[in-house]
Image: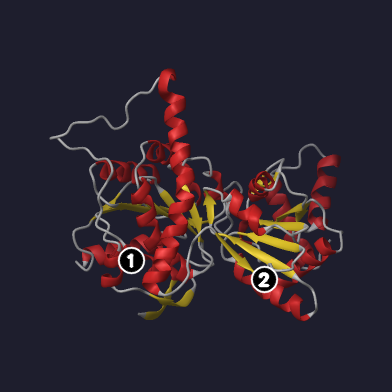
Amino acid sequence: MLKQIQGSQGVAQAIALCRPEVICAYPISPQTHIVEALGALTGSGKLEDCEFINVESEFAAMSVAIGSSVAGARSYTATASQGLLFMAEAVYNASGLGLPIVMTVASRSIGAPINIWNDHSDSLSQRDSGWLQIFAEDNQEAVDMHIQAFKIAEELSIPIMVCMDGFVLTHAYERMDIPTQEQVDAYLPPYDPRQKLDVNHPVSIGAMVGPEAFTEVRYLFHHHTIEALQAIEKASEDFEKAFGRKSGGLLSPYKIEGADTIVLALGSVIGTIKDTIDEMEKEGKKVGLIGIKSYRPFPDKQLAELLKGAKKVVVIDRALQVGIGGVVTDDVIRATRKMDLDIFSVIAGLGGRPITKKGLKDVFNKAMNGELEELYFLDLDKELVEKQLKREKEDRHTGPLAEAVVRDSVSIHKGGI
C-alpha cells in the first residue's frame, strides 16, 4: 500500500509486519520515532504477541535483546551515535553468541564535540564487531531492508544492523510502498531459532573458551559471516520476486559501462551522486557509480569484478579514521589490491554538512583531470583551519578547539575578521 509518511514511521510499520516478539529500546535521536511508533502499535494491540520493554540505557537495550533472543524470541532494537557506543560491549556479545537480533542504526555523528547530525561515524565504528551491516539508500529501501534483515539474520544466526541516515531519511516524508501482512508472512517464515535455552534440552550459551579452541570459534564466526554474502544476495532476489522491486543486495551499479572514473558510496548520498552524474553526462563527461549496500561482509570479489575497466575510483567517505583517512577507502583498497587503480578518499558530510551537486561535480572533475588529492576533504573551510593553526602557534593557551573554531566561523560568515 502506498503511503506518504515519515521514514521512521515506514520502518516501524515494516518491523511490526515482521512480527517481533520482544522490542527493547532507549530513546536517542534520530531513531526515537521508530521505537515510539512501535511502542504505540504494541500498546494499542495492533502489534500482537509482542512485549515492548522500556529500558534504562542503550546497554540495557542490547542486554535485554540478548536475553530475549537466547530465550527464543524474535528480537529488535534501535539506536544511534553515543547510544551505539554505550552498548558496544553487549554488541560484541550478541555477535559472539550468534544471536539473530535486528537493530536499526539511525546513523549520526559521535562526539566530542557534540553533534546530532548525520554521518557514518557510529555505524562504521562497529565494523569489526561481527554484526552484518547493510545500508539503505532511501526510505523505501530502508523499509525493504528491514524485512530482508530478519530473514538474513535468522537463516545464519548472526545479528544485523540496518543503517539508515539519521534525519536525512528518518525524518523525511516520502512515498513508500508498505507491504501487507500477508505478503511479509509469505516472504518471512516463522521464527525457528538455531539455538535457544530449553529446560528439556539443557545447553550453555556463553561458555568460557580457552586458547585450545578460541581460534577455531572465531574462524567459524568469520566463515559464517562470509556466507552472508550469498544470503544477502539471495534475500534480495527473493524479495524482488515476491514484491516486484529490487532492494538491498550487495552492490548497486549505476552507469558504470564505459566509465573510467567510478564513484563508491554508502547511504542517502547515492541519490545526490546519481543526479550529479546525470548532469555531467549531459555535459559529455562519463562518471559511474557503485552504491555499496552490504558493508559487512564487504563484497570484495564482486566489487573488483564491477571495477574492471575503471582507471580511477573516488570513495565518498562519511567517516574519518583520525590520522589515517577514510574508513570505507581501506576496504576498497584491500578489495582492489591486485588491480591498477588510482583510488581517492573524499571525506564528506561529516557532522551533517550538506553534500551538494556543486561540490561533487568539482571533485569528479578534479579526479578526471588528475588534480584530486589522494585524501581530500570536501568543502573544507581552509580559512577557518589556518586561523586556528596560527592561533595555536602563537599562543599555548588557546582554550577549547571546538569553541574557538565555532566562534571564528560565526565571525567569518558574518563578514568579520
Choose top left, top right, bottom left or bottom right for residue 188. bottom left
Answer with left or right where residue 120 lies relative to residue 56: right
Residue 88 in sight: no
Q: From the viewer's side, name the closer residue of 139 and 213.
A: 213
Figure label count:
2
Q: From the viewer's side, name the closer residue of 45 and 136.
A: 136
Label 1: which residue?
37
Q: Residue at left 49%, top 60%?
A: 249
Q: Residue at left 65%, top 62%?
A: 353
- Tell which circle, 2 or 1, labels the residue nearer the N-terminal end: 1
Q: Residue at left 66%, top 75%?
A: 275
- Mark 2 lies on a secondary structure that is loop
Choose top left, top right, bottom left or bottom right for residue 47. bottom left
Figure quadrant of the N terminus: bottom left
Residue 71 in sight: yes
The type of residue carrying mark 2 is Lys
Q: From the viewer's side, name the closer residue of 144 and 46.
A: 144
Would you place residue 199 above or below residue 52 in this image? Answer: above
